[in-house]
Amino acid sequence: MMKTTKKHSPFISLGLFLLISASRAEIFTSIGQMTDLIYTEKELVQSLKEYIQAEESKLAAVKSWASKLDRLTRMSTSDPEGYLAHPVNAYKLVKRLNTEWSDLESLVLQNPSDGFIANMSVHRQYFPDEEDEKGAAKALMRLQDTYKLDSESFSKGKLPGVRYNSQLTVDDCYDMGKTAYNDVDYYHSVLWMQQALRQLDAGEEALVSKADVLDYLSYSVYQMGDLQRAVELTRRLVALDPSHQRAGGNLHYFEKLLQKELRESERAKPNPSEERPIQLGTYDRPLDYLPERETYEALCRGEGIKLTPARRSRLFCRYNDGNRNPRLLLAPMKQEDEWDNPHIVRFLDTLSDAEIEKIKELAKPRLARATVRDPKTGVLTVAQYRISKSAWLEGDVDPVIARVNQRIEDITGLSVATAELLQVANYGVGGQYEPHFDFSRKDEPDAFKSLGTGNRVATFLNYMSDVEAGGATVFPDFGAAILPRKGTAVFWYNLFRSGEGDYRTRHAACPVLVGSKWVSNKWFHERGQEFRRPCGLTEVD
């Protein structure tokens, strides 16, 4: 049977995580912080160039010495006594052997790599590690699933909205497949090993052998329940490498199982030539823990949106002066309806470019892996369904934050005195936040107990960047998808006026396919809103 092996793949770039406050093994969770890796790699490349130049200079000097001494020794060995008869030649021979050859020895012993190695040693402690590489690989698989992209699209860089094309080599695809295999994810192992094989068959050169790819692919296909393909691929492996330590045993085992399966099903053995190549959709993707996975991902792709013409006719745009708020009378906010029921609105020009850059500047050194609140304990913890980094900014950290907080209060009419701090988030490779509620449900009464301000009554979400592809905010319950638009904000209530949760507001941040997504949000709590949003007469007012 196939054995599990691990190999550190070279396809994720080296880099330095310059912000000391950030933890290792989570570099991939923030594109904003990953930009530092670009500059670090540039610095290392420059250091490498300097090392090469020093080595070339050293070699040129040694070559010059060798050339000069070669000429001298040819002349001196042709007539040693005659050569040494000249006193100057005798002197120079003694001098060379006593001094100049020692200088040459010192030159040869010099190690120009010392500077480069020292630079690498300083930076190495902040390099991405194996967990980062694994996280980045799984992020590509998540994008592949969500947006129904085949492995070839990724391998050839065929992604919507890309400005910089980048392709995956055979070795990259092999490492992707092996990451999935080691995670017992045979579905993705098949897709990526198949792509590696496809590129090898097309003549691409690689470090990995075709036998290694077939070894992983045949066993992964077997684990997916496709015995016929497993037999064909293993036969190909045996033909390629008859001495392979597992192939012969695997082939015998697979053939035996296939014969048994054919007898029990009483069907004819399929013709191998009729087998279609493995591609996206050949095998069913395994089900997971998320019940609305299919609906959620369809909305991320722009499918299944239920904005009918009748519903669209009920959406309007207007100027919002915050119920004649003095700060908005002369400059009211532009407001657009995104959804009628539950009511979701978008405010335009809520943040200027300068404010956005200042907020990002303040947040970047504070970014840490985003957390979720444990529904049972109320303790914040990281979760695989939320891939981003976030920072919390106090109102007094900078006048810009105080001004933004005041603006949010003016727009919504809700008090920020009991609201949570402004949270800034940046999404990483394939960054997402799967369907979740912002408010606490009845089975998690202690979620916000430590705050003493009641439940989250409303959400105000600022979009601080445009996103080339992906990254929408979607509501699977009623089929809404809201695209990020820099400088705008969306707002909705999580609770009815009665304080009961509006379960329709379960929402998600779709994986970022191309781009860097920055958002900031303000969560309002019940306390302090008693006179700003009074209770209704029914449970669902």
Image: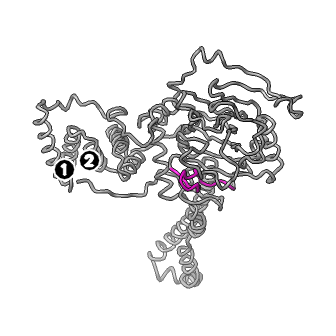
Q: Quadrant of residue 110?
A: bottom right
Quadrant into which the N terminus falls: bottom left
Of the numbered discs in the image, which one, if any, rests on residue 415? none
Q: Residue at x 60, y 51 (%)?
A: 447
Mark 2 crowdedness (10 Å alpha carbons): few <14, some 14-19, many ≥20: many
Amino acid type at mark 2: Tyr
| Few, some or many residues within 10 Å of mark 1 (<14, 14–19, 20+) | many
How far, Cα to Cα, is label 1 from label 2?
8 Å
Q: Nearer the viewer, residue 130 or 463?
A: 463
Q: In this figure, which residue is indicated by the disc labeled 1?
A: 250
Q: Position of residue 488 (x, y in %)?
A: 72, 33
Specify whether 4 is left or right of 429.
left
Residue ID at (74%, 35%): 534
Residue bounds of the magenta highlight: 366-383
- Which picture quadrant has residue 536? top right
Residue 515 horizontal side relative to residue 239, left or right: right
Q: Residue at x 21, y 50 (%)?
A: 241
Q: Is residue 1 magenta?
A: no
Picture coordinates of residue 29, whole percent (x, y): 56, 50
In the displayed structure, would residue 518 be above or below residue 366? above
Tag 2's secondary structure? helix
Residue 205 x/y as whole percent: 37, 45
User: Observer-nearest residue: 208 or 504?
Assistant: 504
Earlier along the polypeptide chain: callout 1 or callout 2?
2
The secondary structure that most of the magenta stretch takes on is loop
